[in-house]
Image (tube, grey):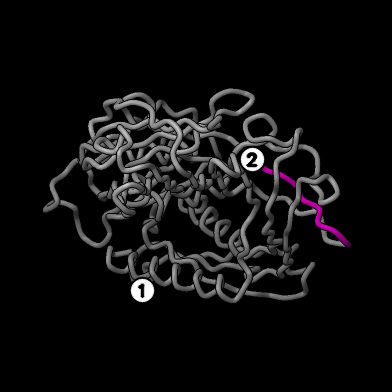
């Protein structure tokens, strides 16, 4: 029995029917980032015309013991085919609806005005408030302006107070990192004939996971010293008109016996802003958090009778893992869930905890991404 349901829709979100059992299925649901899925069917499958039509959509659920659990929804991004006359096949790749936050919605400094009235270099669209509220208040006018299919439920005010400013950015560039740092989960799910933005507070799995318990299949860890202990922050203006403050984590410097300065450019915050001190403190806190000591973990888990998706854990939940030997107890999130099915192997679900951020390759990738963001900010006037 296929423990996954795959429902097919057209570009107008009209239900075209269930897929049934494919020849194979694989995918990954990712916490606060786009996931993807891929499945193969016979070329004469009755859903092939619907899936091959432009704008075709798919919603995938897992039949967990606790009930039907959403994995991802999205559009068919790629169609492949092959095989002989008697064994031809079609393969479909689905990209997560989370891309509405990373690619589809561009946030203007003045979303209610025409493109010719977006202001000069100092024009930003800025909001301060609970992290969830800031995300929705920045998205709402830009979703309306573009006519993007995205429903924004009334905010529950989740998360700490943050400030975010956008200038032709996506929320993935400027806002989502604030929610991720606050421990909130964000996803976009197709519900009926609409895409819905959902923000939630992930849970914590209370008991430590060990290799002895049979849950931890393999893992690696790394403990890294801080890279930042004090931050100078510069608010808006030019030359002498700029306001600067310094923030020092004295306990971090005392514990590690080192002073490591950094600079945070906050020129989107006017030097005469009535909330200047609080806003600059928030920027400094972000930079200090980025440069904090890190216990990195990359871990692959397996499900057991007591550790199952939907009943014991979900995507984004916090777990503590104790690797063999004298490894420290490290706490991180279920960052991704791999899922797969074939007629021979059946269903395989693999939760992945943490990420490996301290290897040479990962460091290069992070530097490239940081450079890309910096160039993007320069192109958009910061």
What span is colored magenta in the figure?
316-325
The part of the image, by quadrant, that contains residue 220 is: bottom right
Question: What secondary structure is found at the residue carrying circle 1?
Answer: helix
Viewer-nearest of labels 2 and 1? Answer: 2
Side of 251 where 371 appears, left or right: left
N-terminal-most mark, 2 or 1: 1
Residue found 49% across the figure and 35% down from its top: 199
Question: What secondary structure is found at the residue carrying circle 2?
Answer: loop
* Residue 62 drawn at (x, y percent): 54, 32
Q: How busy is the neighbourhood of tag 2: few (under 14 within 10 Å), some, or many (20 plus)?
A: many
Locate the N terminus by quadrant: top right
Q: Which mark is residue 317?
A: 2
The part of the image, by quadrant, that contains residue 218 is: bottom right
Side of 203 where 63 appears, left or right: left
- The answer to whether any part of residue 24 appears in the image is yes
Q: Which mark is residue 295?
A: none
Residue 344 or residue 367, whichever sits in front? 344
Q: Which mark is residue 239?
A: 1
* Residue 204 drawn at (x, y percent): 70, 37
Residue found 88% across the figure and 61% down from its top: 325
């Amino acid at each position: 029995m296929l423990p996954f349901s795959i429902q097919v829709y057209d570009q107008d979100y009209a239900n075209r029917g269930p897929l049934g059992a494919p020849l194979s299925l694989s995918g990954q649901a990712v916490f606060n980032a786009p996931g993807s899925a891929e499945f193969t069917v016979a070329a004469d499958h009755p859903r092939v015309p619907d899936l091959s039509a432009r704008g075709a959509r798919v919603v995938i659920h897992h039949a967990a013991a606790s009930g039907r659990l959403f994995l991802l929804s999205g559009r068919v991004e790629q169609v492949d085919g092959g095989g002989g006359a008697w064994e031809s096949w079609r393969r479909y790749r689905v990209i997560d609806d989370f891309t509405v936050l990373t690619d589809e919605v561009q946030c203007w400094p003045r979303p209610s005005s025409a493109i010719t009235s977006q202001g000069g270099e100092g024009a930003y669209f800025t909001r301060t408030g609970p992290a969830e509220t800031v995300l929705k208040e920045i998205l709402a006018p830009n979703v309306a302006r573009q006519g993007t299919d995205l429903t924004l439920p009334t905010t529950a005010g989740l998360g700490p107070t943050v400030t975010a400013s956008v200038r032709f950015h996506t929320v993935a560039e400027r806002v989502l990192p604030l929610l991720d740092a606050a421990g909130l989960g964000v996803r976009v799910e197709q519900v009926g004939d609409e895409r819905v933005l959902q923000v939630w507070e992930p849970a914590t799995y209370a008991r430590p996971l060990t290799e002895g318990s049979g849950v931890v299949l393999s893992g690696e860890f790394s403990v890294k010293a801080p890279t930042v202990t004090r931050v100078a922050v510069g608010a808006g203006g030019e030359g002498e008109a700029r306001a600067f403050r310094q923030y020092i984590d004295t306990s971090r410097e005392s514990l590690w016996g080192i002073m490591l300065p950094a600079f945070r450019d906050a020129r989107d915050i006017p030097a005469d802003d009535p909330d200047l001190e609080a806003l600059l403190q928030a920027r400094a806190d972000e930079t200090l958090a980025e440069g904090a000591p890190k216990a990195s973990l990359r871990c692959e888990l397996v499900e057991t009778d007591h550790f199952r998706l939907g009943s014991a854990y979900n995507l984004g939940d916090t777990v503590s893992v104790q690797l063999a030997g004298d490894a420290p107890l490290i706490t991180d999130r279920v960052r991704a869930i791999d899922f797969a099915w074939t007629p021979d192997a059946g269903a395989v679900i693999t939760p992945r905890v943490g990420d490996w951020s301290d290897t040479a390759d990962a460091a290069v990738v992070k530097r490239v991404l940081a450079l890309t963001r910096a160039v993007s900010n320069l192109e958009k006037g910061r």
